[in-house]
């Protein structure tokens, strides 16, 4: 399959986000089809990141690989797992926007996860909170492959991918807001697609959220696996819980011949993409580093 022109760069995607607050665009870039451009709320001067102290990153994911990626990068996230019905979110999206690309689908799922967790994150953290939702899918011959249904499905998928190139898309949705507990929470996944009115999006007297998102896309080159290798790998259980039925940071690593793009995006969280999204809301990666990362005598 042809590789993306710039696989190491996050894909600027337009997604159906009519439930977002009406304000300026979050990511500028070419649209693949005429969907509404995602927007983010403008910050209020009284709640700028610079006045809120060290922010807390809330990771809206149960993925140990994503948490480990952040930890290795000097960031200790608070883990709050979302209970988003991913099938329902995708079904509703594709019903309204049947031409949505895989890069856009993972972005909408990441948005749903972040929004579902944001309210819980606010209750736990009474200061500047950043909520990050992520979702990954493998694209092969234009078909989107999420997690396999069972072991038989995993065997079939890995055999299909063997010796070929595919694209791993990871959507990232980042929400930044101070936790002043004023009741102005982002809409939950259960409200999505139902009521786009500005009155419900922007509660009276509430604090604004800033929301940004992007998709990281990386070309993955699979090795030629023997039937014995496929059966043994599936028997470990590892492929059953991950998009595309493979990992690069675990037992599946030896079966990946190479990547064209960001390695971290394949693991499930692109650190360069995170850095760029943080910059959009006025935060640096260094702001999230754990205490003691920068030596006082350096």
Image: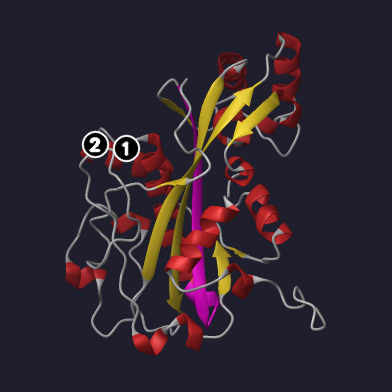
Tell me where residue 35 sits by quadrant.
Answer: top left
x then y, percent, for residue 297: 82, 83
Residue at 40 percent across and 24 percent down: it is 142
Residue at 73 percent across and 23 percent down: it is 233
Q: Could you tell me what secondary structure mostly forms the magenta stretch? A: strand
How many other residues sit within 10 Å of disc 2, few (<14), some (14-19) or many (≥20)? few
The quadrant in which the C terminus is found is bottom right
Residue 61 shows in this picture: no
Q: Secondary structure at mark 1?
A: helix
Residue at 75 percent across and 76 percent down: it is 294
In three-dimensional space, the C-alpha distance between marks 2 and 1, rounded to whole angstroms, equals 6 Å
Left or right position of 241 against 217: right
The reply to whether callout 2 and callout 1 are in contact (CB within 8 Å) is yes
Left or right position of 74 against 95: right
x then y, percent, for residue 296: 79, 83
Residue 130 shows in this picture: yes
Query: Within the magenta stretch, is there residue 135?
Result: yes
Tell me where residue 293 sits by quadrant.
Answer: bottom right
In the rendering, which numbered label is found on residue 19? Answer: none
How many other residues sit within 10 Å of disc 1, few (<14), some (14-19) or many (≥20)? few
Q: Which residue is mark 1?
A: 91
In this rendering, is residue 232 above or below 179?
above
Q: Which residues are magenta?
A: 122-140
x then y, percent, for residue 258: 66, 29
x then y, percent, for residue 229: 75, 16
Query: Within the magenta stretch, is there residue 43?
Result: no
Residue at 48 percent across and 67 percent down: it is 279
Q: How is the image coloured?
A: secondary structure
Nearer to the camera, 9 or 196: 9
In this rendering, is residue 104 above or below 286?
above
Q: Which residue is mark 2?
A: 95
């Amino acid at each position: 399959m042809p590789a993306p022109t710039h696989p190491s760069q996050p894909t600027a995607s337009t997604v159906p986000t009519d439930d977002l607050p009406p304000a300026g665009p979050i990511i500028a870039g070419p649209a693949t089809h005429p969907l509404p451009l995602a927007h983010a709320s403008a910050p209020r001067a009284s709640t700028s990141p610079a006045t809120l102290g060290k922010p807390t990153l809330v990771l809206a994911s149960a993925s140990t690989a994503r948490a480990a990626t952040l930890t290795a990068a000097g960031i200790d996230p608070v883990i709050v797992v979302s209970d988003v019905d991913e099938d329902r979110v995708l079904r509703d999206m594709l019903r309204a926007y049947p031409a949505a690309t895989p890069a856009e689908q993972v972005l909408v799922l990441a948005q749903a996860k972040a929004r579902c967790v944001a309210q819980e994150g606010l209750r736990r953290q009474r200061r500047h909170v950043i909520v990050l939702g992520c979702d990954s899918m493998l694209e092969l011959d234009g078909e989107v492959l999420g997690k396999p249904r069972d072991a038989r499905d995993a065997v079939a998928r890995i055999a299909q991918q063997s010796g070929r190139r595919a694209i791993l898309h990871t959507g990232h949705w980042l929400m930044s807001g101070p936790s002043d507990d004023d009741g102005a929470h982002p809409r939950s996944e259960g409200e999505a697609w139902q009521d786009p009115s500005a009155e419900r999006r922007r509660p009276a007297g509430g604090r604004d959220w800033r929301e940004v998102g992007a998709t990281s896309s990386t070309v993955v080159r699979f090795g030629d696996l023997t039937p014995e290798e496929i059966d043994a790998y599936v028997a470990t259980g590892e492929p059953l819980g991950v998009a595309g039925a493979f990992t690069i940071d675990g037992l599946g690593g030896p079966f990946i011949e190479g990547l064209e793009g960001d390695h971290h995006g394949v693991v499930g969280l692109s650190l360069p993409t995170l850095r760029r999204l943080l910059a959009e809301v006025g935060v640096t990666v260094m702001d999230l580093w754990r205490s003691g990362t920068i030596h006082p005598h350096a």
